[in-house]
Image: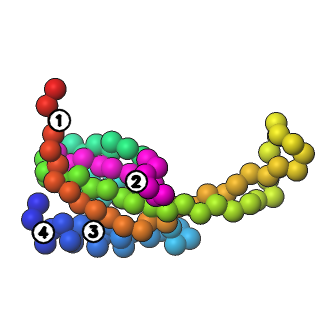
């Protein structure tokens, strides 16, 4: 995959904002599987350096795609049982902040 194709893929993934202005990983996964049928999700929302990273490996295209998201949480009115009276559930929303594409180097075992 050359630099122009990488930039085009980054712009397509950043443009995939759906439902209430948020990005959904499953739509990005569908786009990546269209490029490479052997695409594999290695990590899903792995917490690193204050962000959540989802990593896809595309072995036939020779690249690794990293989706970087930030999480925000808010209180809801839903009461949670099992704790002190008055505890409520949190609502988490994820926002896509960056897409990185790196060369894929397979690990030989």
Q: CA distance from mark 1 to mark 2?
A: 20 Å
- Residue occupied by mark 4: 3
Tell me which numbered mark, 1 or 3, is placed earlier along the sequence. Answer: 3
Q: CA distance from mark 3 to mark 4?
A: 11 Å
User: Callout 1: few (<14), some (14-19), or many (20+) C-alpha neighbours within 10 Å?
Assistant: few
The relative height of residue 82 versus residue 3 in the rendered view (above or below) is: above
* Residues at marks 3 and 4 touching, judged by CB atoms closer than 8 Å: no
Please give the range of residues in magenta: 46-59
Query: CB under 8 Å between callouts 1 and 2?
Result: no
Disc 4 packing (10 Å; few <14; some 14–19; many ≥20): few
How crowded pointer 2 is (Cα within 10 Å; few <14, some 14-19, many 20+) is rated as many
Residue 10: which numbered mark, if any? 3
Instruction: Give the residue number, with chain letter if any, for mark 2.
Output: 53
Q: Residue furthest left?
A: 2
70 sits left or right of 1 in the view = right
The answer to whether marks 3 and 2 mark residues whose Cβ atoms lie closer than 8 Å is no
Q: Is residue 45 visible?
A: no
At x 28%, y 62%, the residue is 100
Whether residues under marks 2 and 4 lie with C-beta atoms below 8 angstroms apart, the answer is no
């Amino acid at each position: 995959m050359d630099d122009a194709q990488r930039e085009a893929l980054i712009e397509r993934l950043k443009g995939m904002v759906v439902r209430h202005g948020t990005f959904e990983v499953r739509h990005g996964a569908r786009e990546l599987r269209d490029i490479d049928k052997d695409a594999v999700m290695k990590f899903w929302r792995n917490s690193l350096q204050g962000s959540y990273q989802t990593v896809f490996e595309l072995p036939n295209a020779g690249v690794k795609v990293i989706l970087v998201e930030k999480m925000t949480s808010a209180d809801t009115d839903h009461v949670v049982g099992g704790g002190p009276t008055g505890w409520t559930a949190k609502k988490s929303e994820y926002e896509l902040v960056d897409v990185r594409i790196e060369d894929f180097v397979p690990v030989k075992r």
